[in-house]
Image (cartoon, rainbow, N blue to C red):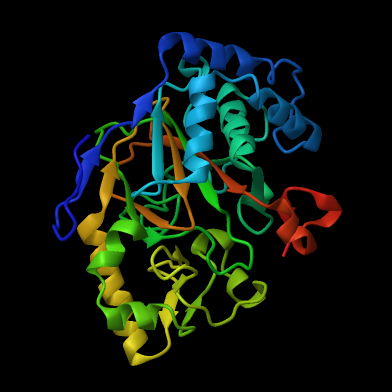
């Protein structure tokens, strides 16, 4: 697989780290279909999630082993791309094209996402974003081309997911159901483990100080900025000095001091210099370690003809208990 050399400015374009063989892909599809047989199976139903959690144990060993190894150590890029996952392309409807599109009814793709989420931890959602759906559509929406979020088609800047919240997800999982028409859309990822050596000591110090405020992203709606829980000054980098965690979104993270402004710009340059671009094809599953990796997207050209790019997304927490005060009835949805 081609890699980007730290310090260069040209991001590499990469394919899957590895792919399921046809036999394991077929076994995964058959298992996913057992979660879609009731006719009334709802993705957000706690009982359905419990069934998906149990089904995870029956997925092919290479898939389970790869996910477990990534959970223990997410590697230099903080990203794992697995090809060959079933998405039932023959039965796919038209790509959704309405704002706030989500997947409520169980499908093969939604079952695959949820099973893998349960292998990493527990699925998680935020009531203010996409109505709290556990499986969300990432699709272009007519009239929202310049929207800086999953409904747009202009470049999307680097960010970790929901860094404003006291309980951001530990992982973000994407499954590609359809590629864009021109095959030019790219998911861009940059990990702190490669960007950190490019930062000066002064920048590292500033990024580790609570001199930044991150507000909710546009996908949470305009009222979220004033009602979001516990927004406070935070550092961009925290934890181990040699392997820190990241909380940052270039669009909504505001530096509060001159040195913070300079450090955030330097961090952005380091991410650009070490970024990789993932050109996803149907059946590609991407797991991003949201604690150590930022992601974004290149521009593309939707046609709104029912065959546009379509990803589905799920958030994961490794410790559901820690957000108990934000989840009524011990569910999977954070309501504040």
- 333 vs 60: above or below: below
Q: Residue at the spot x=14%, y=52% of the render?
A: 10
181 relative to 20 in the view: left or right:
left
Position in image of residue 244 (x %, y %): 43, 66
Residue 138 makes an appearance in the image: no
Position in image of residue 141 (x %, y %): 44, 46
185 relative to 141 in the view: left or right:
left
Q: Nearer the viewer, residue 251 or 115?
A: 115
- 163 vs 170: above or below: below
The count of marks equals: 0
Position in image of residue 90 (x %, y %): 47, 13
Q: Residue at the spot x=53%, y=58% of the render?
A: 219
Q: Quadrant of the N terminus?
A: top left
- 235 vs 274: above or below: below
Residue 297 makes an appearance in the image: yes
Q: Residue at the spot x=76%, y=32% of the render?
A: 50
Q: Residue at the spot x=49%, y=37% of the render?
A: 69
- 150 vs 27: above or below: below
Q: Nearer the viewer, residue 38 or 166?
A: 166
Q: Quadrant of the C terminus?
A: bottom right
Q: Nearer the viewer, residue 323 or 241?
A: 241
In the displayed orientation, state which residue is furthest to the right.
329
**On the image, which quarter does residue 43 sit in?**
top right
Q: Nearer the viewer, residue 126 or 324?
A: 324
Position in image of residue 194 (x %, y %): 29, 57
């Amino acid at each position: 697989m081609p890699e980007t050399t730290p310090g260069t400015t040209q991001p590499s374009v990469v394919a899957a780290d590895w792919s399921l063989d046809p036999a394991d892909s077929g076994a995964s599809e058959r298992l996913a279909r057992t979660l879609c047989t009731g006719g009334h199976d709802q993705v957000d139903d706690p009982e359905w999630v419990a069934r998906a959690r149990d089904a995870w144990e029956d997925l092919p060993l290479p898939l389970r082993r790869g996910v477990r190894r990534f959970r223990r150590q997410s590697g230099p890029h903080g990203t794992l791309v697995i090809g060959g996952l079933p998405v039932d392309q023959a039965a796919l409807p038209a790509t959704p094209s309405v704002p706030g599109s989500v997947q409520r009814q169980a499908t093969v793709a939604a079952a695959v996402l949820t099973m893998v989420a349960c292998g990493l931890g527990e699925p998680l959602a935020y009531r203010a974003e996409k109505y709290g759906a556990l499986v969300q559509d990432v699709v272009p929406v007519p009239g929202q081309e310049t929207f800086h979020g999953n409904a747009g088609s202009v470049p999307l800047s680097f960010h970790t997911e929901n860094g404003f919240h006291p309980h951001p997800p530990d992982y973000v999982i994407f499954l590609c159901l359809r590629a864009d028409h021109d095959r030019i859309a790219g998911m861009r990822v940059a990990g702190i483990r490669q960007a950190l050596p490019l930062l000066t000591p002064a920048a590292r110090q500033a990024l580790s100080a609570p001199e930044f405020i991150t507000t909710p992203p546009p996908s949470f709606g305009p009222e979220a900025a004033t009602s979001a829980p516990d927004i406070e000054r935070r550092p961009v980098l925290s934890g181990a000095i040699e392997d820190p965690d990241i909380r940052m979104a270039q669009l909504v993270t505001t530096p509060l001091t001159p040195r913070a402004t300079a450090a955030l710009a330097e961090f952005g340059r380091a991410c650009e210099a070490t970024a990789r671009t993932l050109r996803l094809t149907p059946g590609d599953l991407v797991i991003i370690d949201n604690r150590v990796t930022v992601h974004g997207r290149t521009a593309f050209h939707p046609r709104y003809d029912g065959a546009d790019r379509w990803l589905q997304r799920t958030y994961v927490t490794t410790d559901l208990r820690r957000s108990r005060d934000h989840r009524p009835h011990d569910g999977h949805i954070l309501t504040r």
